[in-house]
């Protein structure tokens, strides 16, 4: 059983009137790659900096390895240096006047390790990060991607217990960002280090994480595996946020027919367990673009636009006031103006309470 690596209880942080973290409770297990995901300003960086000891929270507790490192009440504040964490930020923050070697060796020299050991460790980590041969260069002589790999090398050479990364790929171009995702994932698989990763990019979160923690206005909305947050978003905010290319929402009136309950989602009748619906008159239905199927018994929609994207195609279609986005595989062809008949793949929809926005089914 993996142990509790990081435990946050009742954490909050206020900046004047702004509540950056609102009563956060979160447990991170050993070996997890957990991503804090949410829109700009939702409190991701403040949370990460609080774990690192760089922020002074207004209340709550933080445990690392089951040891209390922060408690407002008990006035415990363990300094960042004593928390044995590694940090990488969006800006690489390399020292410009030091070579790659010196940048990476810096922390080891402070620890007064023997010269030969420093050299071996730096060269080994450079090899790990595919930067062999670059040790004599200066940061400004390297590309953005290489600089960020050095920032990561500088973190891992110190063998920290926990990796903390705040939008480390945001400054890289799109293609490099995709490559770096797999490098970071491999690094995590090799090292097994518990990692807390911050991003506002849902694809980055989905592809790399073992768990995703979705935040809004300083409040955790859902913690779960990428599959859970994708297929079973806990509320409308998560459903909308984890949405690529977009989620279809319907205000679905509830229909009763001979003791059975149905919800009308854009003309498609979905049979629902009466226990879920109870006496509700309407619910919000969420359906992903890839969860529609073409079928002769389906509801007729007219294609309004066809957006081929190589491996998949997006189709926008309309039926009265209902407009939907459907994702088909790359071989599908259709033209604007054509009629298609669609249904929803069995059970692949989520229902939400219109008032609270919370998932019913
Ligand atoms: N040093 C600061 N002074 C005042 N307000 C801050 C400071 N740092 C962050 N905030 C506010 O706290 C909230 C959360 O910020 P942050 O943790 O940086 O969000 P994120 O990283 O998710 O974009 C925002 O409303 C932000 O404006
Ligand atoms: Mg931030």
Image (cartoon, rainbow, N blue to C red):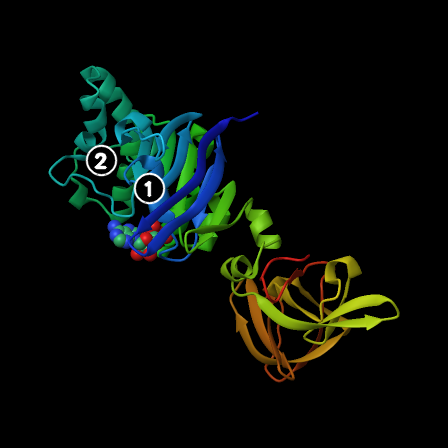
Frontmost residue, 258 versus 292: 258
Q: Is residue 287 above or below residue 164?
A: below
Q: Position of residue 177 (x, y in %)?
A: 37, 50
Which residue: 65% across, 84% down?
320
Q: How many marks?
A: 2
Residue farthest along the front direction in this orientation: 73
Do the numbered discs 1 and 2 sit on residues whose CB atoms are within 8 Å? no
Location of residue 341 by image quarter: bottom right
Question: In the rendered image, is residue 187 in sight?
Answer: no
First of labels 1, 2 by sequence position: 1
Q: Cβ(mark 2) to ligand 2 < 8 Å?
A: no
Q: Quadrant of the N terminus?
A: top right
Q: Position of residue 249 (x, y in %)?
A: 60, 69
Which residue: 28% across, 54% down?
16
Which residue: 16% across, 45% down?
140
Tell me the SS state at disc 1.
Answer: loop
Residue farthest along the left direction in this orientation: 97
Q: Quadrant of the C terminus?
A: bottom right
Frontmost residue, 104 versus 23: 23
* Residue annotated with mark 1: 57
* Residue annotated with mark 2: 134
Q: Is residue 170 above or below residue 68?
A: below
């Amino acid at each position: 059983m993996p142990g509790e690596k990081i435990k946050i209880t009742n954490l909050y942080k206020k900046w004047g009137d702004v509540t950056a973290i609102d009563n956060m409770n979160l447990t991170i297990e050993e070996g997890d790659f957990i991503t804090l995901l949410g829109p700009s300003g939702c409190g991701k960086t403040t949370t990460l900096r609080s774990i690192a000891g760089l922020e002074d929270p207004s209340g709550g507790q933080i445990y690392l390895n089951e040891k209390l490192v922060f408690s407002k009440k008990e006035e415990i504040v363990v300094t960042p240096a004593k928390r044995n964490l590694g940090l990488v930020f969006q800006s690489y923050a390399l020292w410009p006047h030091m070579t790659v070697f010196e940048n990476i060796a810096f922390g080891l020299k402070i620890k007064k390790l023997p010269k030969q050991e420093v050299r071996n460790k730096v060269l080994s980590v450079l090899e790990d990060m595919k930067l062999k041969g670059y040790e004599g260069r200066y940061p400004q002589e390297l590309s953005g991607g290489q600089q960020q790999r050095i920032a990561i090398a500088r973190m891992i050479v110190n063998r920290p217990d926990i990796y903390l990364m705040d939008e480390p790929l945001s400054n890289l171009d799109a293609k490099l960002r995709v490559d770096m995702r797999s490098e970071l994932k491999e690094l995590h698989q090799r090292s097994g280090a518990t990692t807390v990763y911050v991003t506002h990019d849902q694809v980055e979160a989905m592809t790399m994480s073992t768990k995703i923690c979705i935040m809004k206005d300083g409040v955790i909305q859902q913690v779960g595996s990428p599959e859970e947050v994708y297929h079973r978003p806990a509320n409308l905010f998560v459903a909308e946020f984890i949405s690529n290319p977009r989620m279809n929402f319907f205000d679905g009136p509830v229909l009763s027919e001979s003791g059975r309950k149905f919800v009308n989602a854009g003309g498609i009748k979905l049979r629902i367990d009466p226990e879920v619906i109870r006496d509700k008159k309407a619910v919000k239905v969420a359906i992903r673009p890839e969860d529609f199927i073409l079928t002769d018994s389906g509801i007729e929609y007219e294609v309004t636009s066809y957006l081929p994207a190589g491996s998949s195609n997006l189709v926008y279609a309309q039926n009265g006031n209902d407009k939907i986005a459907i994702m088909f595989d790359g071989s599908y062809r259709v033209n604007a103006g054509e009629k298609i008949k669609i249904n929803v793949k069995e059970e692949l929809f989520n229902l939400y309470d219109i008032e609270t926005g919370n998932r019913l089914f």
